[in-house]
């Protein structure tokens, strides 16, 4: 792995999005396996795709002012600053470090700023005793973090790529998740937060693209989150850090640079285990999380363009464990149809859990089988990524199938 | 708190020690494990973390020659666990684990190094496991009774301590007969009292998974509640304390 190379490619990627429409040199055209330049083809027909064109981001100050959730939290009227997602993550950590003297941030390469620049400036401002590099050992990072948290300190541990979280699986599942339970609440590691970049980035291949949320969604005692944007990332991460349970925050790395919003500079914590309805609709409920939200947004645009009168309801789950089944059930009781999408492979993925739960709650209301649009059940490929991904086109087809059953 | 996966406490001890260092109270952590657990990845991760990050922790390895049925010659080929400490840049001492005063002196010295210099120390205490690994183990299946008897006679920490006390005139043969009798009675009394206690109430099984009970656990609790009320004899409800 060449982490510095990855982050410089991400830098190039956001530049590429900005100059869309102009002729690109052949070398650049070959660079990303999941990007298509042929957006006049079926079924896109010129639609502007992806996070760069998303209407879901709060790009303006007035968008922030209008957000009911931010209003409830009392930060909608305050000062905002343009931030991308890694700056928002940085900001959340700053608030934690400023308000909690026991909090520390550590992981591989975090001291100089991190391979995705999420910890830039922290060591300068808070010192090397609180912001430090660890040796290259995920099981060590996790175990060390658990030990810190068991002493009542706040441990913010970074796993450099979610693909490398597996050596830490024993510590997370057998130790962190069970700590409070096995000690009859005499001890806990609520101060533990693990944050890790996840999901497809266009060129990540097997080991820089995984979304392993399903492995952890199966563990009683853990909380699992995945934000879709800078505003969400700041509020969810801060909530995770302060939540008295061990929490894993998966951060879709492709959004670090490409998702830009006006973000309140004051601190705020978004509610955990509360899904967000991003767009209301009456005919089908579409559920996702993380970077997949933007593919779903596009799929819905194509559906509503091609099937006038049909409206889709888009829900961002935000917290994957414990998840807000109630909000999804409420929506499906209205629409009668459900499509769940995630990048992780289909079999035994999180969509299977949601489908099982919703068919149990809404069986008689369902008008069509629940659709799962997911990564193929193969290791996350490099050259084949465009086929693997539950992209807007595949989701569009699944929503059509659901509507026409 | 207790867990079964071995060596997980080692990197945790490094983290706990780091917290103690930050708390500024001149305290250290002490972490115990066997020579078998020292083969786990967590051992190497934990020692390396403690060394690089400057954690005031004493890593204490009880090398008793066996990990269940696996003798130490099948556990490692190097010079025990102590030689590994050097590899991680950790001050290390090997001590006679059956000599209580040697162990005391080594641990005291280790503590001084740990808290004064904020760095880890590794102690490897050499001993011999006389007992079976557990009540599910019969060690005659993998070692001779003679080997066990020889160790028990020749190098027994309890009898060495007794001899030392007797030499000092602080203990006479027979002093322990009465103590052994009353200690055994105390244990058996506690045992039978505990046996009569009811198991914790059933609803408690859902507590402390999280700091607060989430909706899905509330739902499961109601399900189990209803099921248990329907089939009390199958679930032996009377063994459990009332809600």
Image (cartoon, coloured by chain):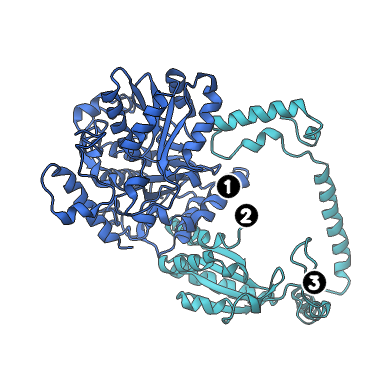
Mark 2 and mark 1 in contact (Cβ < 8 Å)?
Answer: yes
Q: Position of residue A404 (x, y in %)?
A: 40, 23
Q: Position of residue B191 (x, y in %)?
A: 82, 50
Q: Residues within 10 Å of mark 1 (few under 14, many from 20)?
A: many
User: Does residue A49 appear in the picture of this structure?
Assistant: yes
Instruction: Say which of B198 and A48 sits in front.
Output: A48
> Is the Cβ of the residue at disc 2 closer than 8 Å to that at disc 3?
no
The mark found on residue B141 in the picture is 3
Work out whether A215 lies above or below A267. below
In-image side of A13 versus A240 (left or right): left
Is B83 located above or below residue B5 in the figure?
A: below
Q: Mark 3 lies on which chain?
A: B
Q: Nearer the viewer, mark 1 or mark 3?
A: 3
Q: Mark 1 points at which residue?
A: A178
Quadrant occupied by the C terminus of chain B? top right
**Callouts 1 and 3 on one subunit:** no
Q: State the hue of chain A.
A: blue
Q: In which quadrant of the rendered view does residue A376 lie?
A: top left
Please say if A237 is above or below A78: below
Colour cyan belongs to chain: B
Label 1: state its secondary structure.
Answer: loop
From the top left corner, tell me how far across and down residue A130 is, in percent: 36, 56
Label 3: few (<14), some (14–19) or many (≥20) C-alpha neighbours in 10 Å? few
Task: Label 3, secondary structure: give it.
Answer: helix
Mark closest to the chain's N terminus, 2 or 3:
2
């Amino acid at each position: 792995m060449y982490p510095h190379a990855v982050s410089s490619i991400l830098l190039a990627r956001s530049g590429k999005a900005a100059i869309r429409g102009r002729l690109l040199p052949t070398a650049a055209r070959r660079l990303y396996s999941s990007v298509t330049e042929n957006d006049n083809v079926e079924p896109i027909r010129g639609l502007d795709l992806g996070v760069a064109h998303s209407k879901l981001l709060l790009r303006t100050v007035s968008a922030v002012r209008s957000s009911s959730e931010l209003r409830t939290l009392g930060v909608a009227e305050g000062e905002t600053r343009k931030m991308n997602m890694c700056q928002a993550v940085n900001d959340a950590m700053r608030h934690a470090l400023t308000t909690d003297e026991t909090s520390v941030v550590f992981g591989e390469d975090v001291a100089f700023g991190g391979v995705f620049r999420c910890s830039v400036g922290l060591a300068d401002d808070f010192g090397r005793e609180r912001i430090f590099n660890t040796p290259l050992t995920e099981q060590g990072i996790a175990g060390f973090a658990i030990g810190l948290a068991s002493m009542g300190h706040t441990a913010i541990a970074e796993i450099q790529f979610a693909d490398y979280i597996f050596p830490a699986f024993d510590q997370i599942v057998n130790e962190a998740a069970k700590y409070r339970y096995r000690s009859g609440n005499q001890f806990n590691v609520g101060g533990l937060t693990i944050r890790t970049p996840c999901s497809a980035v266009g060129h990540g291949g097997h080991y820089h693209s995984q979304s392993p949320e399903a492995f952890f969604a199966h563990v009683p005692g853990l909380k699992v989150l995945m934000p879709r944007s800078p505003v969400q990332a700041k509020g969810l991460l801060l909530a995770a850090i302060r939540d008295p349970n061990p929490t894993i925050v998966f951060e879709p790395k492709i959004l670090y640079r490409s998702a830009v919003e006006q973000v309140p500079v004051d601190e705020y914590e978004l509610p955990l285990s509360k899904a967000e309805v991003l767009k209301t609709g009456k005919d089908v409920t579409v559920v996702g999380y993380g970077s997949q939200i933007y593919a779903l947004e596009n799929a819905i645009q194509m559906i509503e363009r091609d099937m006038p009168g049909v409206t889709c309801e888009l829900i961002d789950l935000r917290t994957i464990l414990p998840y807000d089944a109630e909000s999804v059930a409420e929506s499906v009781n209205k629409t009668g149809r459900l499509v769940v999408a995630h990048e992780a492979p289909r079999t035994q993925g999180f969509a299977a859990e949601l489908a099982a739960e919703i068919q149990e709650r809404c069986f008689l209301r369902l008008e069509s089988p629940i659709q799962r649009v997911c990564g193929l059940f193969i290791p996350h490929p490099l050259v084949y990524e465009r086929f693997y991904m539950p992209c807007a086109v595949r989701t569009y087809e699944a929503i059509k199938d659901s509507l026409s059953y | 708190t207790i867990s079964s996966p071995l060596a997980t406490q080692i990197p945790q001890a490094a983290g706990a020690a780091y917290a103690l260092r930050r708390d500024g109270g001149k305290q250290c952590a002490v972490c115990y494990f066997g020579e078998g657990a020292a083969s786990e990845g967590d051992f190497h991760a934990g020692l390396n973390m403690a060394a690089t990050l400057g954690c005031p922790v004493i890593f204490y390895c009880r090398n008793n020659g066996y990990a269940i049925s696996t003798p130490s010659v099948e556990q490692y080929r190097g010079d025990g666990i102590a030689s590994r400490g050097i590899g991680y840049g950790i001050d290390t001492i090997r001590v006679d684990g059956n000599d209580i005063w040697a162990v005391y002196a080594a641990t005291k010295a280790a503590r001084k190094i740990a808290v004064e210099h904020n760095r880890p120390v590794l102690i490897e205490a050499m001993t011999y496991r006389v007992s079976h690994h557990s009540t599910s183990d019969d060690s005659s299946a993998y070692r001779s009774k003679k080997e066990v008897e020889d160790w028990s006679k020749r190098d027994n920490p309890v009898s060495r301590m007794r001899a030392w006390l007797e030499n000092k005139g602080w203990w006479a043969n027979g002093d322990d007969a009465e103590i052994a009798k009353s200690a055994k009675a105390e244990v058996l009394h506690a045992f039978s009292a505990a046996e009569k206690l009811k198991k914790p109430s059933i609803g408690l099984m859902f507590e402390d998974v999280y700091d607060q009970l989430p909706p899905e656990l509330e739902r499961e609790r109601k399900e189990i509640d209803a099921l248990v009320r329907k089939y009390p004899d199958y679930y032996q409800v009377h063994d459990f304390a009332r809600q």
